Image (cartoon, rainbow, N blue to C red):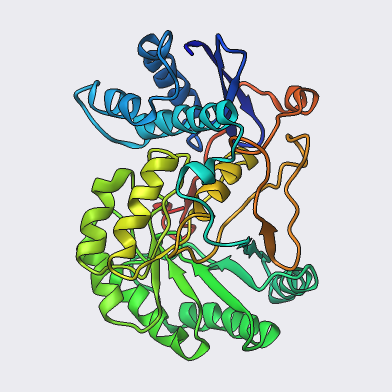
Amino acid sequence: MKITNIRIWHVRPRSAILKMETDAGITGIGEAALEGRSRTVETAIKELSEYLIGQDPRRIEHHWQAMYRGTFYCGGPILTSAISGVEQAMWDILGKSLNVPVYQLLGGAVRDRIRMYKAVHGDTLDELRQSVRQAVEEGFTMVKTGIADFPHMLEPPAFLHKQMERFEMLREELGPDRDFAVDLHARLTPPQAIRLAREMERLQPLFIEEPCPPENIDAMAEVARATSVPIATGERLYTKWAFRELLEKRAVSIIQPDLAHCGGIWEGRKIAAMAETGYTAFAPHNGIGSVNLAASLQLVATVPNFLVQEFKELGDNLLKRPFVIKDGYIDLPEGPGLGIEIDDEKLAKLVYPGNYQIPMHFHQADGSFAAW
């Protein structure tokens, strides 16, 4: 079997779909995007295609090493996102060629269904409350929200009071039998993150995510040591090497690699195994589409230390058979490969030039840039 062609479609709102064609008539699908930089990822994939065309797509690890190390300048979100999309498609082809789901090739499933959580939003307390109530009515056992503002390096007590008012409402609405998490979007400095985390301890959130920027692992570890609230991070870390220091320094309790960015399914499995040795939970990030969700579900079906799965879309706008969440869970996927089929008519309606830009925010007080 040989790869004959690799094509990419940019799809709204901010992702891209890769199709890998072979001379055996088997097509593999992958999510090949980096939010705000998908056109750059497309260029990287075109460069990788010069190596890939004519190769056997079933030699996944071999091609991963060649793509990652063959550029000499290894790593970074552009290269690893390009590799991730290619790698997902190769697993899809391998599974289809053997007529088995990818999870069977990764050692088989360790669970029958996969816990999901829903993002809840609201500019006001009432809006957020309604969003939480809807999630509960839909059967979710966990929700996640963000902080309400774009803080400066340090903020007065009123900032903490405003955030805590929202989180206290979450716990009140959810009760003790459901979980919530808070995504801080790396907007806080360590001292401010510690203050907020300590205030939140009595509410027992499942975790707080990205309390400070991920570039400085020691800063993350400082926050982790200062609170009993579990810390999660990883969506902006790429490959096993970036996670090594995070795990060695016990800076987190939950790791969140994104299979569309970290290097793909097999790289995600290696990261999960590294985390397992330190009793660290695994909760993959997914800020884009349903193809990456399909890849994530195949992987977490096999991961003993899996905690919960994030999603943005279930594929209603793209897949022939969208995913269905029942009582907060998705049943173990069926079908060979990633277990999905793209609906070409739906795809055609989503295609756009790929010019999505991540929103920028600036502080009103002084006009300085505010971390997203």
- Marker count (numbered): 0
The x, y position of residue 39, in whole percent, is 49, 23
The x, y position of residue 266, in whole percent, is 40, 41
- The extreme bottom residue here reads 202
Q: Residue at x 78, y 67 (%)?
A: 138
Q: Quadrant of residue 137?
A: bottom right
The x, y position of residue 73, in whole percent, is 21, 27
Q: Residue at x 24, y 66 (%)?
A: 219
From the viewer's perspective, is 134 left or right of 249?
right
Q: Residue at x 40, y 76 (%)?
A: 230
* 131, above or below 240, in the image: below
* 220, above or below 320, in the image: below
Q: Residue at x 52, y 87 (%)?
A: 203
Q: Nearer the viewer, residue 111 or 20?
A: 111
Q: Quadrant of residue 176?
A: bottom right
The x, y position of residue 59, in whole percent, is 38, 25
Q: Nearer the viewer, residue 304 or 289?
A: 304
Q: Is residue 33 visible?
A: yes
Q: Quadrant of residue 21?
A: top right
- The extreme front residue here reads 98
Q: Is residue 355 visible?
A: no
Q: Nearer the viewer, residue 103 or 297?
A: 103
From the viewer's perspective, is 46 left or right of 180?
left
* 266, above or below 9, in the image: below
